[in-house]
Image: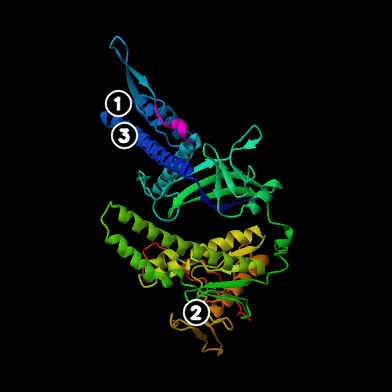
Amino acid sequence: MARHTTFRFCLDPTVEQTVALARHAGAARFAYNQCLRLHVDARERHRTLIDRGADADAVDQARDAVPWSRFSLINTFNRWKVSEAAGRQFLVTGEGVAEVEVTGLAWRGEVSAQVSEEAAVDLSRGLAAWTDSRAGKRKGRVIRHPRFKKKNHAGGSFRMRNKTTGGHASIRVGTGGRPRSMTLPRIGSIQVREDTRRLRRMISTGRARILQATVTRGARRWWISVTVEAADPHPAVQHPARDPDADATGSVGVDRGLRDLVVAGTRDGTETLRVQAPKILTTRLRQQRRLARAVSRKKRGSTNRRKAAARLAKHHVRVRDTRQHFLHQVSNQLVKTHDRLVLEDLNITGIMSNRRLARAVGDAAWGELARQITYKQHWRNGQVVVADRWFPSSKTCSSCGTLRKDLTLKDRTYTCGHCGLVLDRDLNAAANLAAWAEDHARAVTDGVGSGEARVGDRQAAGPVINACRRDGTGPHIRVGGTSPDDAGTPAQTERAA
């Protein structure tokens, strides 16, 4: 067991099962909100004691009572759901005496307890991400404080873990003579639309074990994602192992673009794959605008608006699924035919800030393609190298290494004024990426002095000069900031062949 993967199926529940699924999704939302409310109230009590100047022992007890971890949140919610605050009823005896009976949550026996536990786990992850972001321990965008979830009739999800009791797993596939079915605790066997043969074979042969299942509602359908711990792929479909110290060749650069989604090529400029961008969203944009206008014309809160919103959501789901299917085909073709792939470190977030390119870049899904290539290549015992972000793969000549600074996006053919090379722009970039990876691997193998490996600087097309830009110089560079020249772009002392 060496990897985690997910199988996604579309459920076909009965009317009673649909009600049960909606009940579990609502219970997950309620448990998440209640755990967040208990957490916020505990923090408010701690802050109130500090403001009132209470003694140190009381402040420490209030601080320790704030639930932060998954276990403390689960225990706090379990204590609350059986308390008087969760539910009570008044009973009047024959003598006219009223008594209070603590009932807790009256419906807690109708749903699985795992739903509330997993909701508490999700909240603990959100709180941890928020605190780490505030402390500067988490990279990327700033994470906001978790917020309460709204009741949405068109969405919702819940998660269940797979527990084994009495030798039987709580989450099963294809039982009771129904191959296309999924069995969940408290809900029972639910029919699925897709074939489950592959998952059943992996489980029966001991090559996979179900860890958990996530049920999601979207676009008038229920979906289930089964996360399994699976064995490595068969050695016959894996790439043969290479000796990195003896062989540094065979890298294939992958250039991602808007006109051609993928252009793959070797160092000598040989094209191995070219796939045009399907532009799935662009081709269906007219239909999307019509559906969006239909939603905006309906009265808020009306049934017609809810139906129009469902049609628009169904359209978005089709666009997403079509794009995902196409990206899986492209990534599979790349990882099956090449064991060493080189990708660019693109600043996709920064590119998306350009309103002229945002829709096209989002439709191309460069980040999702890179994610699929990375984990699939890892499964096949391959290698994925990410080139430096400041490496100008498109503006550098793949033959002589000359840097052409006047190259624009309109120039689809690269013409070198030094050696006379005329080559497709994307193929030239792919060749530069492949050369970058091979030079980098060769330099790591050779080593330099103290053990630090350096690679030739293809930007300079000449000897390496260890010069750094002065702090605060250049456009958009603050004092003390990092400039493109300080980013550690590998250098090359010899030109590419």
Circle 2 residue: 395
Is 401 on the left or on the right of 251, as rendered?
left
Look at the image and say whether residue 442 sits in the magenta stretch.
no
* Residue 83 or residue 36, whichever sits in front: 83
The tag on residue 34 is none
Amino acid tagged 1:
Ala
In the rendered image, residue 261, in percent from the top left (x then y), is placed at 51, 73
Whichever of labels 3 and 2 marks the residue nearer the N terminus, that label is: 3
Mark 1 surroundings: few (<14), some (14-19) or many (≥20) residues within 10 A: few
Magenta stretch: dominant secondary structure:
loop
Point out the frontmost of discs 3 and 1: 3
Instruction: Determine which residue is flagged by label 3.
Output: 44
Instruction: Name the spot of residue 344 as percent of width and height, x first.
Output: 53, 69
Foreground residue, 159 or 126? 159
In which quadrant of the rendered view does residue 165 lie?
top right
Amino acid type assigned to the residue bearing label 2 in the image: Lys
Is 406 or 25 nearer to us in this picture?
25
Category of crowding for the residue at label 2, using alpha-carbon neighbours closer than 10 angstroms: few (below 14), some (14–19), many (at least 20): many
Give the x, y percent position of residue 108: 44, 31
Residue 497 vertical placement versus 132 (above, below)? below
